[in-house]
Image (cartoon, helix red, strand yellow):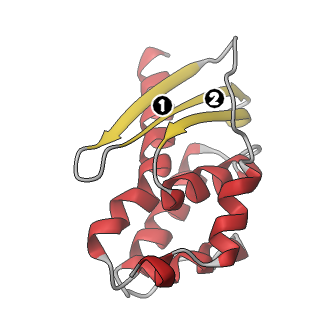
Amino acid sequence: MIQELYQKNLLRLAADAHGDGVMKDADAEQTLDNPTCGDRITVQIKMADGKIAAFRHEDRSCMLCQAAASLLGKHAEGLAFGDIVDIREDLRSMLGKEAATHEPRWNELEFFQVVTDHKSRHSCVLLPFDALIAAMENLKAKA
């Protein structure tokens, strides 16, 4: 199973660690844990005009969670709440072998298809998205 999941493209994405680090003046921050595997991620965002202006993450997690967080770090800036929710839902659908409701925005989402047969690892891939959505929801609730 490990060899099947730890594909070079996912390892490279995780190693690139796009968006890794701490933001001192974040508008919102959210930490989430995955109790089934011990993953923990904290995301921080800065918003401007309803869109993500800056995204950072810190994680103590498996490679799959790190790769998903890096993917967000690479592409999240400039996206609105609805965009992130749609992308997360399309990723969840792909992992569940369901038809996507939208045209995939990021080619790298396909990297995670190796996880489809490993249901216990779906939450690892989705955790960074869930943390980002929660951070954005918390910010909306404060407004």
Q: Position of residue 142 (x, y in %)?
A: 45, 15
Where does the image place residue 135, in percent across and percent down from the top left? Answer: 48, 31
The single residue placed furthest to the left in the displayed view is: 36
Residue behind mark 1: 135
Of the residues shown, which amino acid type is indicated by label 2?
A: Ile
**At 43% from the left edge and 25% from the top edge, which residue is drawn?**
138
Residue 113 is labelled as none
Image quadrant assignment for residue 81: top right
Residue type, numbered disc 1: Ala
What residue is rendered at 45% in x and 28% in y?
A: 30
Q: CA distance from mark 1 to mark 2?
A: 8 Å
Q: How many numbered marks have been drawn onto this rendered protein structure? A: 2
Q: Which residue sits at x=46%, y=54%?
A: 62
Q: Nearer the viewer, residue 63 or 41?
A: 63
In this view, 10 is above or below 22: below
Location of mark 2 (residue): 45
Q: Position of residue 9 (x, y in %)?
A: 69, 75
Does residue 101 appear in this view?
no
Q: Is residue 9 visible?
A: yes
**Apparent side of residue 68 relative to residue 93 in the rendered image (left or right):** right
* Left or right placement of residue 75 versus residue 141 in this view: right
Residue 35 location in percent, x, y? 23, 45
Give the class, few, some or many, for how many residues have Cα within 10 Å of label 1's Cα (few <14, many ≥20).
Answer: many
Q: Are marks 1 and 2 in contact (CB under 8 Å)?
A: yes
Q: Earlier in the sequence, mark 1 or mark 2?
A: 2
